[in-house]
Amino acid sequence: MLKAFIQRPTLATIVDNKCVGLQKQGFEKRTISVMRFTAAAFDRSFSPNRRDFYNIMYISKGSGIFSLGLKHYHITQPTVLYLRPTEIVSWRQFSTEIEGYICCFTRDLTERHRNLQTVIDRYGFFSDPGKSVVGLTAGDLAEIDDLFERMYRVDAKHGGSLAEDAMQAWLQLLMISNLQAGMYPEPDAITDEFGHVHAFFRLLEEETANVNYRTPIRIKTVKQFADKLFIHPSHLNVLLKKHTGLNVSTHIKKRLLEESKTLLLQTDWTLGEISYAIGFSDQPNFSQFFKKRTGVAPALYRRINALCVVFENNNYHIFNLNK
């Protein structure tokens, strides 16, 4: 029997769970999967990483900077991103809202369906870096939305070989549709403004990554971040407000809250250990911070949200650990 605690997924872990993780949990024959995401479904960023499978990401709403290798794209309109295996990619979300779909598939899918491989080779979305990013117009959205929604529903409801046949056919239609759109934005020369915003999110992620009570968060104020970025705090606030709609302090507090929730659900640390790891001098201040933003005390949040997934006999069972 395999047990795993449920956690708030990041974009990177979503992709891992849908493609790699499923194979580890008894779905070795799965070659393609599609998920729909919103802002609540994943972190505002994921660090540079590689994947062992093909990935198509459709951003229907939202903005941010997408990095593909050494190229950077400022995404402000609906866009389809084609990511080939082993490509180094990263994402920094600027807007407070984001929606779209992720489709990932393995090389086994293209080996089983040679027509799909032919379309991939012919149109070059995965092999030609100049075609990896496809901008969409308002007229393209209905068709793209429909194709992804069809794949998502078939994947969620059915699975199996028939679903695989249908999904790979829709993938071919997707690439044909994107070829007809033919909008391939040039990589951006990141301005100083975007550079500062990008650097802030990178520093925020670095500071909160791998947090524990041996290496607690040290940077948590606007001035501390500004000093690290060699920029005046007021100017940094202006830039974040302009490009994301939120000031620096709000972004920091939201990130600290996300980490707090994760530690409450994913560890057995005491509230004192968590408050110290998050950067608070004492537990009462941490509890006040948490309750003000969630409406419940940390201990209660842990008690009502501590869920566990059990995979047994090819079925998932979800239950509350505290009941």
Image: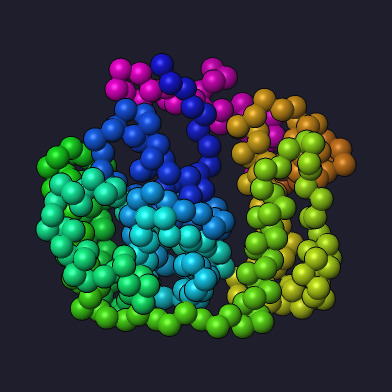
Horizontal side of 307 relative to 37 (left or right) equals right
The spot of residue 70 in percent (x, y) is: 52, 71
Residue depicted at 47% across the width and 67% down the height? 68
Horizontal side of 18 relative to 224 (left or right) equals left
In the rendered image, which quarter is residue 118 located in?
bottom left
Indicate yes or no whether the magenta region holds residue 302: yes
**Up/down of 163 relative to 255, above or below:** above
The spot of residue 9 in percent (x, y) is: 50, 44
The spot of residue 213 in percent (x, y) is: 78, 36
In the rendered image, which quarter is residue 239 located in?
bottom right
Is residue 222 visible in this depiction of the protein?
no
Observer-nearest of 78 and 46: 46
Q: Quadrant of the N terminus?
A: top left
**Up/down of 151 relative to 229, above or below:** above
Observer-nearest of 162 and 106: 106
Number of marks = 0
Residue depicted at 55% across the width and 83% down the height? 189
Is residue 196 visible in this depiction of the protein?
yes
Indicate yes or no whether the magenta region holds residue 90: no
Question: Which region shows up in magenta?
Answer: 294-323
Q: In the displayed image of the protein, which residue is found farthest to the right?
A: 281
Horizontal side of 91 relative to 246 (left or right) equals left
In this picture the colour scheme is rainbow
The spot of residue 86 in percent (x, y) is: 42, 55
Horizontal side of 227 relative to 35 (left or right) equals right
Q: Quadrant of the C terminus?
A: top right
**Up/down of 203 relative to 302, above or below:** below
Residue depicted at 74% across the width and 62% down the height? 249
Residue depicted at 29% across the width and 48% down the height? 106
